[in-house]
Image (cartoon, rainbow, N blue to C red):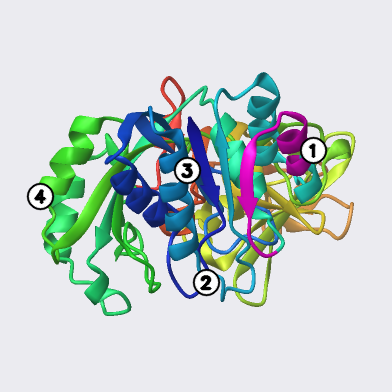
Amino acid sequence: MFIGIDDTDSEQGLCTTYLAAIMMKRLSRVGEIRGFPRLVRLNPCVQFKTRGNAAVAFEFETDQSKRARELALQTFYEFSDLSGKNTNPGIVIAEDPSSTITEFYRKAATDILSINDALNILENENIWHRGLKNGRGLIGALAAVGAEFADFTHELIVYRQRTRWGMPREIDAKSVWQADALTYPQTWDNVDYFNNRIVFSPNSADPVLFGIRGEKIEAILKAFQIIKSEPAELKVLYKTNQGTDAHILEGKISGVEDDRSYKLCGTVQDKPWIIKGGHVFFSIHNGSKMVCSAFEPTKHFRNTVKKLIPGDFVEVYGAVRSGTLNLEKIQVLNLVEQVSYQAPICPSCRRRMESSGMNQGYRCRHCRTRIQARHHVKLQRDLEKGYYEVPPSARRHLSKPLVRMNGEIVHPSR
């Protein structure tokens, strides 16, 4: 059987991955977990998400299916935080996920789906399910069951002892920086160098102590061995679509919709401008116009955006909200020549000339020489072609870090 769970946490606490960890531990009494459990990130633009919009699914083999379902349901009820305003848990148990469910996962990662979209498949295919409150979690639970990863990474999530929930986390900062130094780029987003922050551990009251994301399982386990922290209750290594850009749609500016994430190409139309709060904006054009933004939390990434000038050709990645694309990363494909217009040197006496007035050329005050030609100097661009990204502290779970983009010109936020 394939078991999928979603929407069991709240803004205040608990965690869907923790529920899944406890469920797998209990189910191991009556069967065997097959392969890695899947941590499935869905469309990050969904308005009703609690925190990271993650669902979990795992494959389970047993000859006691009725007892297994009872244990799963009991755990589901016990560890769902029904006090959460946006918490609407869902659990799905399917025998053999169909291609329809796999396609449902792809839509859930990129689009906005309704509860009825999930219920129609569940009922048509006679799939066992339970939903609490309005049952919105059935969307993610069904999507997680059908998830197939064209690209994937791993995350080792370490959980706190229950007696410590809500208390400050005890993690030795020096060991985290050391672990990152010894395992990067096979692990990433443990720390944020530019902002001098540890980012692999949450600040909320949920059961997660920290999570180590990476390309190589060996590197993840090496980092875990180096990190010193409070005692853990348990840990789970997940296979995940995090860091893969699974949420990104390829499209044209004229066809974008709010609450979806896109990769779009266009020519920079105007000089970037800054508004109160330090947010930076610019627009691109490719048949239609799209305003792009780099908000204050993206920190030094905004400096890259500020260096763009009209005529540069770029590829932008990000989520569209209220008609504006919020940047996750940008690829500079072509840079136009930047020039500065200034008074020329007099060809006769080699002194700097001065303007004779608008559209009247230049004159030399010393030898009276006049010329009409407009003089310009080519400036060195403080920007290179290639990919640039927001720092780890501002990165979405699904956004592919540049250290994973092999064969490309990259400028990691390292």
How far across and how far down the image is residue 363, in percent?
Answer: 76, 54
Give the alpha-carbon distance from disc 4 to disc 3, as whole Å. Answer: 38 Å
Mark 4 is surrounded, within 10 Å at the Cα level, by few (under 14), some (14 to 19) or many (20 or more) other residues, namely some
Residue ID for mark 2: 11
How far across and how far down the image is residue 285, in percent?
Answer: 82, 40
Circles 1 and 2: CB atoms closer than 8 Å: no
Callout in the foreground (4, 3): 3
Residue 347 in the magenta stretch? The answer is no
Q: Which amino acid lies under the numbered mark 2 shown in the image of this protein? A: Glu
Give the alpha-carbon distance from disc 3 to disc 2, as whole Å. Answer: 28 Å
Mark 1 is surrounded, within 10 Å at the Cα level, by few (under 14), some (14 to 19) or many (20 or more) other residues, namely few
Callout in the foreground (1, 2): 1
Mark 3 is surrounded, within 10 Å at the Cα level, by few (under 14), some (14 to 19) or many (20 or more) other residues, namely some
User: Label for residue 226?
Assistant: 4
- The mark that comes first in sequence, 3 or 2, is 2
Q: Identify the image quadrant of residue 233.
A: bottom left
- The mark that comes first in sequence, 2 or 4, is 2
Q: Of 3 and 136, which appears nearest the observer? A: 3
Q: Which amino acid lies under the numbered mark 4 shown in the image of this protein? A: Ile
User: Label for residue 120?
Assistant: 1
Callout in the foreground (2, 4): 2
- The mark that comes first in sequence, 4 or 3, is 3
